[in-house]
Amino acid sequence: MLSFENDYSEGAHPEILRRLAETNMEQITGYGMDHYCESAKARIREACGCPDAEIWFLVGGTQTNMTVIDTITPPYAGVVAAESGHVNVHEAGAIEATGHKVLTLPQHNGKIDATELRDYIATFYADGNYEHMVFPGSVYVSQCTEYGTIYTKAELETIADVCHEYGIPLFVDGARLGYALTATGNDVTLKDLARIADVFYIGGTKVGALFGEAVVFPHGNAPRHFLTLVKQHGALLAKGWLLGLQFDTLFTDDLYTRIARNANEAADRIRTALREKGYRFAFEAPTNQIFIVLDQPTIDRLSAHVRLGFMEKYDDEHSVMRICTSWATTPEHVDELIALL
Amino acid sequence: MLSFENDYSEGAHPEILRRLAETNMEQITGYGMDHYCESAKARIREACGCPDAEIWFLVGGTQTNMTVIDTITPPYAGVVAAESGHVNVHEAGAIEATGHKVLTLPQHNGKIDATELRDYIATFYADGNYEHMVFPGSVYVSQCTEYGTIYTKAELETIADVCHEYGIPLFVDGARLGYALTATGNDVTLKDLARIADVFYIGGTKVGALFGEAVVFPHGNAPRHFLTLVKQHGALLAKGWLLGLQFDTLFTDDLYTRIARNANEAADRIRTALREKGYRFAFEAPTNQIFIVLDQPTIDRLSAHVRLGFMEKYDDEHSVMRICTSWATTPEHVDELIALL
Amino acid sequence: MLSFENDYSEGAHPEILRRLAETNMEQITGYGMDHYCESAKARIREACGCPDAEIWFLVGGTQTNMTVIDTITPPYAGVVAAESGHVNVHEAGAIEATGHKVLTLPQHNGKIDATELRDYIATFYADGNYEHMVFPGSVYVSQCTEYGTIYTKAELETIADVCHEYGIPLFVDGARLGYALTATGNDVTLKDLARIADVFYIGGTKVGALFGEAVVFPHGNAPRHFLTLVKQHGALLAKGWLLGLQFDTLFTDDLYTRIARNANEAADRIRTALREKGYRFAFEAPTNQIFIVLDQPTIDRLSAHVRLGFMEKYDDEHSVMRICTSWATTPEHVDELIALL
Amino acid sequence: MLSFENDYSEGAHPEILRRLAETNMEQITGYGMDHYCESAKARIREACGCPDAEIWFLVGGTQTNMTVIDTITPPYAGVVAAESGHVNVHEAGAIEATGHKVLTLPQHNGKIDATELRDYIATFYADGNYEHMVFPGSVYVSQCTEYGTIYTKAELETIADVCHEYGIPLFVDGARLGYALTATGNDVTLKDLARIADVFYIGGTKVGALFGEAVVFPHGNAPRHFLTLVKQHGALLAKGWLLGLQFDTLFTDDLYTRIARNANEAADRIRTALREKGYRFAFEAPTNQIFIVLDQPTIDRLSAHVRLGFMEKYDDEHSVMRICTSWATTPEHVDELIALL
């Protein structure tokens, strides 16, 4: 059956599989101490314009979020995130399991607002009892967000300014970073992100890799003994080169950008069709996730032919459904879907 | 200076000090294994109408909340609380430090609503992704609440019904329980509470003791090896009899109730005076905490003579201030305050 | 350069790569809810003779150990392990990071002794202060051990008897289980293990897979909501079918056993050669790890041609070095090594 | 019945009770922000010769150990302690519950050896795999130790030198510090300790207070936002002045030293009597704890008249028993005991 359920339904870009096969019987040092990881890191440093960046390859998103947040957030502090942030909603309490509270701000199409962030922190420090409360100790945003929206460069810069005014690191979850970087209207490059954020990751799982997230500390600012901390969080892959090899491939000849753009182009075509056919959008988002409000008969009709994602009830008769394209979406899949709409 | 700042500004009821002095040089077994603790437990079991109750004496409120919540909430779950709940706001992240998320519901004058609780839990289990989320694993309410309000018996019973429908324990924070039990209009007795809640505590620190909270598992339902768990949370007092002796005193001749009622009577007199003088109440509450909206000049004028608690900014010109009576408040203090108003 | 450094230096058995390539563009449901995982579980249940087994696929060893130990060990308890156990030495404190102490027993060629285990537990409960101490709450053994040795069936059964006498689950770390199952002299089958242990895992990372460990709760005895707990530990792979597919392959036509046996046969040939040439063994072990005592000149000579593992200083002039074969070791590699010795 | 079971069997020195009674109805600010705490801190700073010392009052020993160790030990590290250290044996896993491993060294009459400590750390860093292991991140010693022995100044200095060579803080558990400071043969003053240790505490619970431990960071080197961290660990007493008042009393007119010396003098008399009567000492210790090897008939005979502490089985017929004096021991108690021996 046709599926637009999510962006991690297929394996990996064929070029990645090719290189895995090609190097399969090489004997390689473990735990990321190999030359494929070195090569991948060099390419990412280059792409980020950060010669001093410290880069680590982890396996999955929740794992990366918990490891990074736990290690950059002081013990007396929590992480500030949108109430809709993945770390607040869909990580089974992994952040709290490391001992840190998630401090929520309202979401606006999935994004936090720099002014609300500043108010939140200023109000915190103005409270006579703040020493009895959880300090804001790091800030988490997703680019693109869980709703497919993206921050503008100005928005990210303002958020970073607020963070740095209070000595708080800004962490950008880039599980779908490729789809943000290549979205129509996006003005945030990888180099911008590396300049603005204190730490971010480049998602592989959802953008062409079998699995893998590349954590970037742009200014050589990784927490001390980060490898040990990664291991302690159960996040150190024995055959680390599998991650290096994948990111090396993704950052060769701009593959990461090219395949991410494919998803957005597919989504753009679908959006145009939806608009022409009068579908209602739950909110505007320029990346590979499309959220539309459907009535139950339409859902039933479509479900017979294509798998969509369910997001939430909209009202008694409607639901918000997600159409998700990916690096693997083909023009034929898009044609089929549009024909069904 | 006169102070109505809080209800933990004085030491202990004189009768408690008298017994501490009287027994001071007795050689007593440590860690709560003494006859004073046994006697106190027997009196509390009697007062609760729970012959099978398991009772433990801890030192302070945050410590008690973290120990109880951590040990009654499954590892895959969090604790549901009002967004204004002490565990969510003023415990420095102690709950999250034990690995559990605080799942918040809206507060209505400091209380959660049973219907909203049921909706929250039902929505949780209706979500196709609930296994990726934090389960509601226990419910926390305060009686009286952080805003001085109280749950009715019917409200508590309905909340308990929701909890038990889903197999979730209900935990009642009774840091100010005495002031709830003796409030005008209250219809929840200690026996009711022991019947309705799965675990609750009887606050001593704010009601006549130097320190101490009596945790009651009414149905012999304490977590296994609870003493070890208390110790592991740093909450086991070496000279445990100091706690037993205090609660034994408080539960002799109804002392706990009598001194708690004193606070409410004082508060009732102050409320009447405030009403007559046209002060604005932030919200109605029948216990020992009174929240009023004052303009800055009034605050400045009063502050010269009496210490009040600051709660929060109301608007640019006004603040919500707290007047707090206690077991130790004298009629003379009340007269003085009323004269100042 | 020739390498006998460890058993995770190569990618995966070619048949696994073939199936990954073959299924690469299929659209598959995430988080292990797919038919490849179902098929793999069915094959493992069959191989274990446990129709009720609950099976989960995790990514790596430390991750698996921390997730399993944290979820089977009561909160007032620790895990008992050999002082040489991987969880005690080489997991960067991952177990303690989940809040549990590792309680150590002496190791005898890497193994714990059932009598010492019983003494340890009996002594614990005989101590008048045991409620102030960390309870023995689970037992961890490795099969084969970190020293390449194996437990006999009788040894495992006796350890399990002690555990069950005290209501303690027995957890068997099978990171190298294949090499134990196929060792000369081994008398513990997979079915035996599934009958004796309360939970164990079948290691893939070191036995033919790119990565992956199959956790088996033989009697349908997985902790409640284990998927959520796996997620909370950052251990839930988005593309779970990558694990299912690998184990499905490994448990088709006995591949797992066949490739594990290859490693042992290679090791047996090397052991024979070492013995003939008069090398000194650090201890006797029948599996794919060989520990020998070498003087520095020999180490230097060999290091020019082959990578060995360093284990520890033996004395001022000697070190214990490890020769490690694997599923990927070829007869030609063995020939080369023997020629060098 | 006569009791020499432990040093926390009585309440508090009468002068403390007197001051508690005297100040009982004063209205005092909570959480240690009061003038009694300020006064006590000033006296302790003076006694330590550390004008910059940061001082915090916590309630109990385990609580203090877990709070201090968790906050001074890096997240990738554990605390090094004697295998007999209280934190390793008798704190119900409180240290591990904060996420840190206890790394053990052999004990020599309850003490660790500086050379063994240096070897341990040097060996750690020499291990090629140390990044996969738990770093030594703080060192814990008890003065006096759990066996009543004391470190000499030279011993402490050498241990501190090793610590500082590796950038590791030295933490001294002073639950019984008074009994060490006043022991015959002791050459470590409070000023010495404050110069040598990075953090230590002055035990009140066992030396004259109802409860309370004064944590001293001699060089203004408390972890950032330590009050919040104390609160987060459930260790912040609401009526903090109860602690301040007790330590203010103990550090007025040298009361702490005087009452501690009383315990040692009593113990010295008992030791002399034991020696004269030919009792066998389990080991030599100059403080208020005396460990003797008794046969069962003697234990039975004594137990009819006096409560002693049981330490451990010595052999099938003998046990090690503890005689413990305290600030509260009277000459008459000692006479009675000697008569019984």
Image (cartoon, coloured by chain):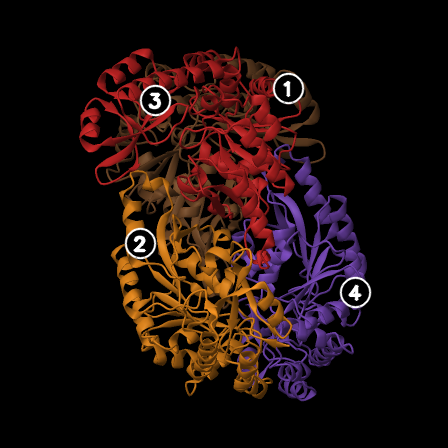
Chain colours: A orange, B red, C purple, D brown
Question: Which element carries disc 4, helix, strand or loop?
Answer: helix
Q: CA distance from mark 2 to mark 3?
A: 55 Å
Task: Residue under label 2, please give it.
Answer: A116
Are both tags, 4 and 2, on one chain? Answer: no
Are both tags, 3 and 1, on one chain? Answer: yes
Q: Amino acid at mark 2?
A: Glu
Question: Which element carries disc 2, helix, strand or loop?
Answer: helix
Q: Amino acid at mark 1?
A: Leu
Q: Amino acid at mark 4?
A: Cys
Q: Is residue D31 above or below residue B98?
A: above
Q: Position of residue C288 (x, y in %)?
A: 69, 74
Are both tags, 4 and 3, on one chain? Answer: no
| Image depth: mark 1 or mark 2 in front | 2
Question: Which element carries disc 1, helix, strand or loop?
Answer: helix
Task: Residue under label 4, please give it.
Answer: C48
The reply, left or right, for residue C209 in relation to residue C42 is left
Marks 4/3 in contact by CB < 8 Å: the verdict is no
Q: CA distance from mark 4 to mark 2?
A: 57 Å
| Chain hosting mark 3 | D
Q: Amino acid at mark 3?
A: Leu
Could you tell which of marks 3 and 1 lies nearer the N-terminus? 3
Q: Quadrant of the N terminus of chain B?
A: top left
Marks 2/3 in contact by CB < 8 Å: the verdict is no
Q: Quadrant of residue B341?
A: top left
Q: CA distance from mark 1 to mark 2?
A: 71 Å
| Chain hosting mark 4 | C
User: Can residue B164 be seen at all in this image of the molecule?
Assistant: yes
State the residue at coordinates (32%, 57%): A168
Q: CA distance from mark 4 to mark 3?
A: 70 Å
Query: Residue D302: which numbered mark, if any?
Result: 1
Given residues D191 and B38, the one toward you in this image is B38
Task: Residue under label 3, please give it.
Answer: D255
